[in-house]
Image: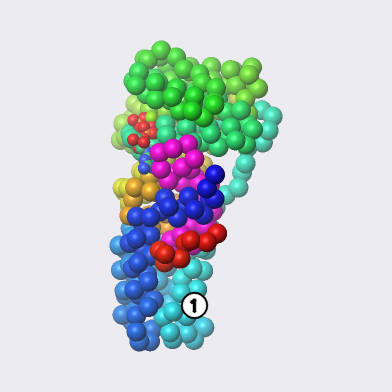
Amino acid sequence: MATLWKRVVDGMRKTRAVFGEGLQQVFQRSGKIDDSFYEELEEVLLGADVGLETAVSLRERFQRRVREAGVSEPEEAREFLREVVTETLARAAANDAPERGSPHVILIVGVNGVGKTTSIGKLAWHYQQAGLRPLVVASDTYRAAALEQLSIWAERAGAELIRSKPGSDPAAVAYDGISAARARGCGVVLVDTAGRLQTNRNLMAELSKIHRVLGKAEPGAPHEVLLVLDATIGQNALSQASLFSEAVEVSGIVLAKLDGSARGGVILAIADRLGIPVRYVGLGETLEDLAEFDPETFARALLEPPGRDAQN
Ligand SMILES: Nc1nc2c(ncn2[C@@H]2O[C@H](COP(=O)(O)OP(=O)(O)OP(=O)(O)O)[C@@H](O)[C@H]2O)c(=O)[nH]1
Ligand SMILES: [Mg+2]
């Protein structure tokens, strides 16, 4: 299996092409550090969809460090950018691995088509590899095709599956999923839900119901509510996150489709502005294309110039 670093670097090719190349030009420019150096840097950040607020904050913190250190050559300042980027990403780091024993229940939510079902397939594989016997629950009961898609992922990942007929009550299926997990000794339950727009009140109310029913079936459940965001939509992902947080308590983010996006700088905005940990990043469409979020790795992948990624 490819190392985390290799998967991240390959997956972030599009972002790296824009961000890494842009930074390369800024840091390799001739002349001393001056105002236009900082302006160019801010432009590169904005071009990778870091967002205005986060770009300004990064630039200011970077500038302060460069001044304090008395550095005047662009190339010497590079390390300070790595520091502020890593610190920003570290705000989104979290470590709460599922405990073995009772089923650890994870509810997956998000807007239509962001990558929920695919991410569940990858997560199921991740937990399967960790020996936790995952069970996936098809609480997206609206479309027969959705049930079929989840079944295929469950099979690929070697996960147990609980599904019901199209049109049945999503909360009831969720309840059955937990009973089944207990009976079968499964350590992790992943609940797939139908995509919904944050503006659809009925569907949002349904999400709260699924949440409540899970809590009745298993004390403390859901232990995690993961909101899947689509990295290709850049800054719009931020508003989705705030609106979903009003309906359910989101405990973590899965940033899907980072591989399809040249706007991977959005991960900095998410870390800087949301106050919700990033747990996983989707980097493609196969079982293995999921990376646990790690600030150092992602900072390095963002900042290191393309071409220097051969080792490690
Ligand atoms: N390149 C890439 N494609 C992805 C990734 N995650 C999901 N996709 C693709 O995005 C599309 C939508 O994914 P789904 O998992 O069906 O999304 P969903 O949120 O379950 O969609 P609904 O259930 O319709 O709301 C599919 O074509 C996936 O293959 C990723 O990390 N990288
Ligand atoms: Mg789906």
Q: Position of residue 157 (x, y in %)?
A: 51, 29
| Magenta span includes 301 | yes
- Residue 21 in view of the camera: yes
Answer left or right for 159 relative to 140: right
Ligand 2 visible in quadrant: top left
Q: Which residue is mark 1?
A: 65
- Highlighted range, magenta: 280-304
Q: Label 1: few (<14), some or many (≥20) within 10 Å?
A: some
| Magenta span includes 76 | no
Q: Name the residue at 43% across, 84% down.
A: 73
- Where residue 206 sits, quadrant-wise, is top left
- Where residue 193 sits, quadrant-wise, is top left
Quarter holding the N terminus is top right
Q: Position of residue 9 (x, y in %)?
A: 45, 55
Answer left or right for 220 relative to 279: right
**Front residue of 312 and 51:** 312
User: At label 1, which amino acid type do we have?
Assistant: Arg
Residue 171's place in the image compared with 261, above or below, is: above
**Front residue of 227 and 212:** 227
Q: Name the residue at 38% across, 87% down.
A: 32
Q: Position of residue 158 (x, y in %)?
A: 54, 26
Q: Position of residue 83 (x, y in %)?
A: 51, 69
